[in-house]
Amino acid sequence: MNTTKQYITDIINEDYKHWQAGLVLFAAAMNSGKTTFITKILAPYAGSRDKSILYLCNRSMLSNKVKMAVEEAGVSDIVTVATYQKIEDLLRSGEAPPDTDYIAADEVHYFTTDAQFNEYTDLSYDYIMAAKEQKVVILMSATADMMFRSLEDNGKVSTKNVYRIQPDYSYVDKLVFYTKGILPNLIDNILETEKDSKILVFVNDTNRMKEMHKLYRDQASFNCSQNAKKDLLRICDTNSIQNETFETRILFTTSVADNGIDLKDDRIRHVFSELTDIDALVQSLGRKRPLGENDHCIFYVRKMTPQGISGKKKTADRNATKAGEYLEDPDAFVSTNCYNRQLYNQFRVFRPGYPGYITDDKYLIMLNRMKYIKYQMERIYYARIENLGYIQTVITALDTKYFAPITTNLSEKNCPAGELFLEKLRKYEGKKLYVCNGQHKSIQQLFREDPHVGLKIKGDSPNIQTINGVMDQKCRDYSPRFESHKDWNRKLPNDEPNPYYGKKYWILASQNSI
């Protein structure tokens, strides 16, 4: 691990004594001492000049952590800690947020990332951007590079007020990409081969959490937000993270733990993330905090399927295009759609107005500008995936030039199925084998004919679970596995109608290890 770790205090020096009203950016890696600087350096300085600080957080867990840091530093009379959601509630009800001389806005990727499910992130964003005219506003994040670059390019912040610290991933031994069906195999292998290591898994949705609960309810803890739906709260313990660790061998958690949680336990050696939002993904992998140079781990990232990527891109395109119509002529758009409630369901970039903010009843439609920006960012992100591929895009986002040398133990040469069989199997990687015309039967024939595999089942329709089960036994070191999907692409790449639209297919999807 890098023994010359850099902290935000090191590069700021005494610049903070000369900051004037306006923006200051901390584009600093996780665990770079941002909170420490605010509570132990800036707060005492501000207090000595009868000035105060509003510290904003995106998660209640982070808010509680910052409050503890404020109390420990003895600056509770100088620093007020609140969540962005609290500020938004105040603004919606017509109340004024706390009046301070500084605003320290932490995890500011919140404005766009949470806009996917929070209708009002633009309110807190507008508030702090307006406040910069009279206050020093510090924007902090490890994953808001696109936002920060935009502020710099548009002259909204002076270059001398931008402080950057690159991430240090020297404690990461390896980066592994896997597909959805492989997760239980990877977890089971770790449990069988490593006696005391712990596993941290970020899941992307409720159904995945329920699926993992069925498999590992006796071996794992399950963590979610206190505000989660009742069916999720029934299987989760919102207090499963205590004293910067968890007691069980496995912790499955939603993105509620992607910020504000530091896990300091050298037994946590495997960190999985299935989050599709790139900012949340990077944040989730950074929850593991190494305790020393011998504390290492492996990162695992679930690959998005081509269908998932296509769906996300289409959603971003549709919403960004519709928002463009609004921006061309807001009055005409609103007058045409002011009572169209279905618009909110069809295009999530819009939200209804609310009492106290809009007085004219006809203006029931508002453009959520943060959500619009998020969709614009996703357009760029998924275009990058189309150009570079998913794996290379994630690697770029992680800035893996700071990784230690990455190796893999998923070699294929010792596969008991034989190299000739693998050579035949590789020809099917990434190809859609449609069930309607029997294309998948070629796989069944291949597995039956090879003498090293010898698939023996009754009938002529072995399912994917059977095929993958044989591969788990005979091809443990060959990573791809078969998946079943339906083709929802209406058109082929040449723009002709897709004759297999809605049809089921098998695909041999790679689990890549780099």
Image (cartoon, grey):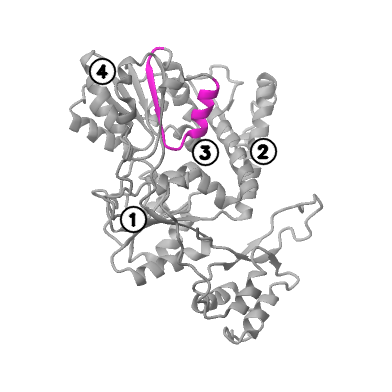
Task: Tell me where residue 221 sits by quadrant.
Answer: bottom left
Q: CA distance from mark 3 to mark 1?
A: 33 Å
**Residue identified by numbered label 1:** 296
Task: Tell me where residue 163 sits by quadrant.
Answer: top left
Which residue appears at 37% of the width and 13% of the height?
A: 20
Q: Is residue 415 left or right of residue 500?
A: left
User: Tag 2's secondary structure?
Assistant: helix
Q: CA distance from mark 3 to mark 2?
A: 14 Å
User: Tag 4's secondary structure?
Assistant: helix
Label 4 is placed on what type of residue?
Ala
Among numbered discs 1 and 4, the one appearing first in the sequence: 4
Q: CA distance from mark 1 to mark 2?
A: 43 Å
Among numbered discs 3 and 1, the one appearing first in the sequence: 3
Q: Which mark is residue 46?
A: 4
Neighbour class for label 2 at 10 Å: few (<14), some, many (≥20)? some
Q: Looking at this view, is 454 or 352 the one in front? A: 454
Residue 211: x percent and y percent? Answer: 46, 62
Residue 380: x percent and y percent? Answer: 61, 38
Among numbered discs 3 and 2, the one appearing first in the sequence: 3
Q: Looking at this view, is 226 or 404 the one in front? A: 404
**Relative to residue 120, is residue 409 depicted above or below?**
below
Residue 89 seen in this snapshot:
no
Which residue appears at 67% of the width and 65% of the height?
A: 505
Q: Residue 150 magenta-drawn?
A: yes
**Residue identified by numbered label 2:** 318
**Relative to residue 206, is residue 89 depicted above or below?**
above
Which residue appears at 42% of the width and 19% of the height?
A: 94
Q: Is residue 411 left or right of residue 193?
A: right
Q: Which mark is residue 116?
A: 3
Residue range in magenta is 134-154
Q: Is residue 499 left or right of residue 237?
A: right
Q: CA distance from mark 4 to mark 3?
A: 36 Å
